[in-house]
Amino acid sequence: MANKVTCINKIDRNSAYERITHIWWIKDSDGWRFKITQQEAIDYMKSKTAYFYTDINWDRADVIIASRNGREYIKTENDWDEPNNLLSLPEC
């Protein structure tokens, strides 16, 4: 099931490229809101128990797992925006 990410927490809110620590998402099936760590989101996606997406101004982008320097993180698939839609979400 896909779930909409509505806001994020980052280490440094003012940095457009700083690491995400938590995401807040709405469970599409019942509207409940949840806060999880970035690692929990990665674990959910790897186990195929949850999928996430952003929807900014009717521009939907799926959240994917990426890796840099051996460290996994989440981002939106290529949406041609810089920074990507996930990093553009407001602070929770």
Image: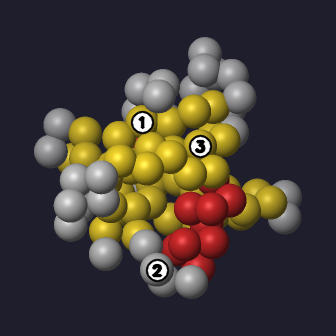
Q: Secondary structure at mark 2?
A: loop
Q: Give the image quarter of residue 52.
A: bottom left
Asked if the residue under mark 2 is in contact with the one under mark 1, i.e. CB atoms within 8 Å, the reply is no
Furthest residue in direction top, as rendered: 14
In primary-sequence order, the first of circles 3 and 1 is: 1
In primary-sequence order, the first of circles 3 and 2 is: 3
| Residue 88 point in image, percent of width and height | 43, 32
- Rounded to the nearest angstrom, the CA distance separating label 3 from label 2 is 18 Å
Q: Secondary structure at mark 1?
A: strand
| Residue 76 point in image, percent of width and height | 45, 54
Q: At x 25% / y 47%, what residue is drawn?
A: 55
Q: Can residue 84 be seen?
A: no
Left/right placement of residue 28 relative to residue 16 reads left
Furthest residue in direction right, as rendered: 69
- Identify the image quadrant of the N terminus: bottom left
- Rounded to the nearest angstrom, the CA distance separating label 1 from label 2 is 20 Å
Report the residue marked by disc 2. Answer: 49
Type of amino acid at the residue the image marks with label 2: Thr
**Looking at the image, is 85 positioned above or below residue 64?**
above
| Residue 15 point in image, percent of width and height | 64, 22
Q: At x 50% / y 65%, what residue is drawn?
A: 64
Q: Which mark is residue 22?
A: 3
Left/right placement of residue 80 relative to residue 70 reads left
Type of amino acid at the residue the image marks with label 1: Cys
Report the residue marked by disc 1. Answer: 7
Badge 2 density bin: few <14, some 14–19, many ≥20, Cα 10 Å: few
